[in-house]
C-alpha cells in the first residue's frame, strides 16, 4: 500500500500531464517514499485520457479514473479521495501552479509535528489579472465576515492530509461541493504554508469568469445563510420606508394638494422596489435550487473507465 496518494484532477490537460509527471518523478525519487498518482480525467475532449492510459501501462504507480462526462473539479477531488489508499492523501493541480517541491516539507511536518493537514495559500497573485485578483480578495473577505467556517484568503486545494482527515472529508457526500469549505468545516489541526503565484507549465486555464462566479456562489450558499437574512432585512427596511413615504404623501396632499405631480419619480421607485424584490427572490431561489439538487440524490460522478487499480477498485460505476 502506498504511503502517499496524490489526487490530480485533469480536464483537457494533455500538454501539462507529461511535464507534471516528469517533475513528480524527481520529487518521488528524492523523497524515497512509495506514492500512487491518481489522475482523474474529468471528461476531457483532448488526448488527456490517451496520455493517462499510456502512463499507466508504463508505470504501475500511475492510476487513472475517467468520467463519462465533465462533472467538475469538485467531483474529481471526491472521486480521487474515494479511491486513494495511502496513509497520507494529497490534492494537487496538474498545471504545476501547486509547486511539487513543497511536498517533502509538507510530509515532514506531518511526520514530526502534531498536525493533521498541511495546506497551502498564495502569498501573491503576480501574473493574475488585477480585476480577477480584486474580486477574489473581496470573495474571501465576504466569506470571512458572513460564514462561521474560516476560509483562508488565497487558500489552494493543494494540501497533504492524514488518512483520518481524508475519511472525514469523504463523510461529507453532498452533491453541491465546495472543497475549500469542506476541508475547513471538518476541522483538524492545519498548518498553512505560503508560496508565490506561479504560471501554468502548459495549456490554458479552464476557469472562466463565469465558472469562477458560479464557484463563488457555491461557496457562499454552501457555508452561510447570511444572504437569506439580508433579504429579510432589506424587505423590512423597504416596508418601513414605504410607510414613511405614504405618511409624507398624505400630509403633503392635505396641506398643498397637487396629487398628480411626481409620477415619474413614482415609476422609478416602483422599478427600484421591484428590482429589490427580484434580487431577494433570486437569493431564495439559489438556496432552493441547491436543496432541490440534493434531494434528487443524483451521483456526484459516473466512471467510464479506470486503470491500474488493484482488485477492481476502480471499476465503472456511479457514485452518490
Image (tube, rainbow, N blue to C red):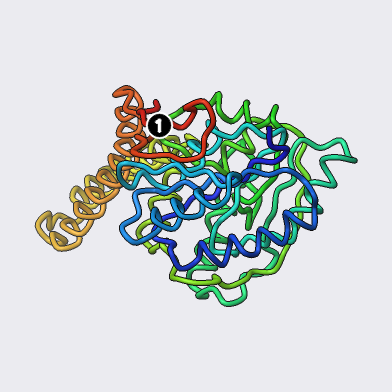
Q: Residue 136: horizontal and vertical position, in percent? A: 53, 61
Packing grade of label 1 (10 A; few <14, some 14-19, many >=20) is many
Camera-nearest residue between 147 and 5: 5
> Within the image, what quadrant is residue 227 found in?
top left
Q: Residue 261: horizontal and vertical position, in percent? A: 13, 61
- SS of the residue at dot 1? loop
Camera-nearest residue between 275 and 311: 311
| Residue at image coords 43%, 70% | 204
Question: What residue would you read off at disc 1?
Answer: 175
Single out the residue that lies furthest toward the left. Answer: 260
Single out the residue that lies furthest toward the right. Answer: 112
Q: Does residue 219 appear in the picture of this structure? A: no
Number of labels in the image equals: 1
Would residue 315 appear left or right of 267 to someone viewing this image?
A: right
Q: Residue 272: horizontal and vertical position, in percent? A: 25, 54
Would residue 286 appear left or right of 98 to someone viewing this image?
A: left
Q: Residue 158: horizontal and vertical position, in percent? A: 63, 51
> Within the image, what quadrant is residue 154 found in?
bottom right
In the rendered image, the quadrant that contains the N terminus is top right
Would residue 162 appear left or right of 208 to someone viewing this image?
A: right
On screen, 279 above or below 176?
below
| Residue at image coords 25%, 49% | 273
Would residue 289 appear left or right of 179 to someone viewing this image?
A: left
Camera-nearest residue between 87 and 91: 87
In the rendered image, the quadrant that contains the C terminus is top left
Amino acid at each position: 500500500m502506498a504511503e502517499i496518494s496524490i489526487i490530480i484532477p485533469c480536464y483537457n490537460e494533455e500538454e501539462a500531464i507529461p511535464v507534471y509527471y516528469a517533475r513528480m518523478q524527481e520529487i518521488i525519487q528524492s523523497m524515497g517514499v512509495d506514492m500512487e498518482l491518481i489522475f482523474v480525467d474529468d471528461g476531457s475532449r483532448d488526448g488527456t485520457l490517451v496520455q493517462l492510459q499510456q502512463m499507466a501501462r508504463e508505470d504501475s504507480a500511475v492510476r487513472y479514473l475517467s468520467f463519462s462526462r465533465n462533472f467538475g473539479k469538485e467531483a474529481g477531488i471526491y472521486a480521487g479521495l474515494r479511491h486513494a489508499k495511502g496513509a497520507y492523501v494529497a490534492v494537487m493541480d496538474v498545471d504545476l501552479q501547486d509547486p511539487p517541491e513543497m511536498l517533502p516539507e509538507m510530509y515532514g511536518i506531518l511526520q514530526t509535528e502534531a498536525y493533521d493537514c498541511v495546506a497551502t495559500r498564495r502569498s501573491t497573485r503576480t501574473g493574475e489579472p488585477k480585476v480577477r485578483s480584486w474580486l477574489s480578495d473581496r470573495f474571501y473577505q465576504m466569506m470571512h465576515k458572513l460564514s462561521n467556517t474560516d476560509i483562508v484568503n488565497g487558500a489552494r486545494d493543494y494540501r497533504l492530509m492524514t488518512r483520518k482527515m481524508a475519511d472525514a472529508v469523504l463523510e461529507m457526500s453532498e452533491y453541491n461541493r465546495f472543497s475549500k469549505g469542506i476541508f475547513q468545516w471538518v476541522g483538524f489541526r492545519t498548518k498553512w504554508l505560503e508560496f508565490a503565484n506561479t504560471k501554468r507549465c502548459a495549456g490554458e486555464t479552464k476557469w472562466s469568469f463565469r465558472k469562477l462566479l458560479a464557484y463563488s456562489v457555491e461557496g457562499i450558499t454552501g457555508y452561510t445563510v447570511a444572504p437569506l437574512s439580508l433579504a429579510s432585512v432589506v424587505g423590512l427596511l423597504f416596508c418601513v420606508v414605504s410607510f414613511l413615504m405614504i405618511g409624507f404623501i398624505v400630509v403633503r396632499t392635505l396641506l398643498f394638494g397637487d396629487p398628480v405631480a411626481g409620477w415619474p419619480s413614482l415609476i422609478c421607485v416602483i422599478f427600484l422596489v421591484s428590482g429589490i424584490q427580484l434580487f431577494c427572490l433570486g437569493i431564495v431561489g439559489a438556496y432552493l435550487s441547491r436543496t432541490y439538487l440534493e434531494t434528487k440524490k443524483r451521483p456526484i460522478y459516473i466512471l467510464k473507465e479506470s486503470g491500474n487499480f488493484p482488485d477492481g477498485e476502480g471499476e465503472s460505476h456511479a457514485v452518490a
